Amino acid sequence: MTKFSILKSLLEANRSVRRFDAAREIPVEILENLVALTRLCASGRNLQPLRYRIVTDPAERDRLFPALAWAGYYKDWNGPAESERPVAYLVQCLDTELCSNCLCDDGLQLEAITLGATAMGISGCIIKAFNKQTVIDALNLPPRYEPRYVLPLGYAAETVQIVNVPDDGDIRYFRDENSTQCVPKRSLADLLI
């Protein structure tokens, strides 16, 4: 298998999962290894201003969970049931004592983490829609750390598949009759100018 085909396979498998097997924990060492991948990423101005708060403690997870908006397109769903909640979170924070703008570092690092997680059979869902103050309070974050994204992690308890964007152009993800989460993706022709 070529490096390109390995990367393509990882990208195809790296889907946003919102329902997890809450009975399967992830060791802290694995989470640390995922964060260590960010050291290998490009960084604007090479400032490397992002920090990560690992959350595995059940009490902290319970305080963090209500701060998150889980799926904007599922209007009648408030997130995973207790038995489907993530077993870990990585909270990405900007160290504001280093800078006020991390440029593109946040996305680069989150992609590295989720690709690494996918390679280990772990799933996640990058969340930007959250109550920042609730996250700060739930984790007692020092003032210098500004939460940027929350990444719930766990072992998938749902199936996610890529489908083609339909003729009407609707890009909203949806669950089909088998409860498979379907994620419409544009064709290559649509992406090229």
Image: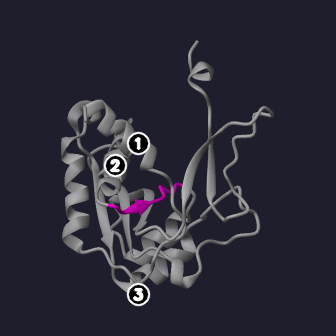
Q: Position of residue 172 (x, y in %)?
A: 70, 47
Q: Are marks 2 and 3 in contact (CB under 8 Å)?
A: no
Which comes sooner in the sequence, label 2 or label 1?
1
> Residue under circle 2?
115
Q: Nearer the viewer, residue 192 or 35?
A: 192
Location of residue 154 (image quadrant): bottom left
Q: Position of residue 54 (x, y in %)?
A: 30, 69
Could you tell me which secondary element the residue under label 2 belongs to?
helix
Q: What numbered label is drawn on residue 124?
A: none
Give the amino acid type for the residue marked by disc 2 in the picture.
Leu
Q: What numbered label is drawn on residue 11?
A: 1
Q: Are marks 2 and 1 in contact (CB under 8 Å)?
A: yes
Residue visible at 24% across and 48% down in the picture: 38
**Would residue 169 be seen by someone viewing this image from the given angle?**
yes
> Residue under circle 3?
59
Q: Give the class, few, some or many, for how many residues have Cα within 10 Å of label 3's Cα (few <14, many ≥20).
A: few
Q: Position of residue 96 (x, y in %)?
A: 33, 51
Above or below, 143 against 42 in this view is below
Task: Report the magenta residues as a range.
Answer: 121-128
Q: CA distance from mark 2 to mark 1?
A: 7 Å
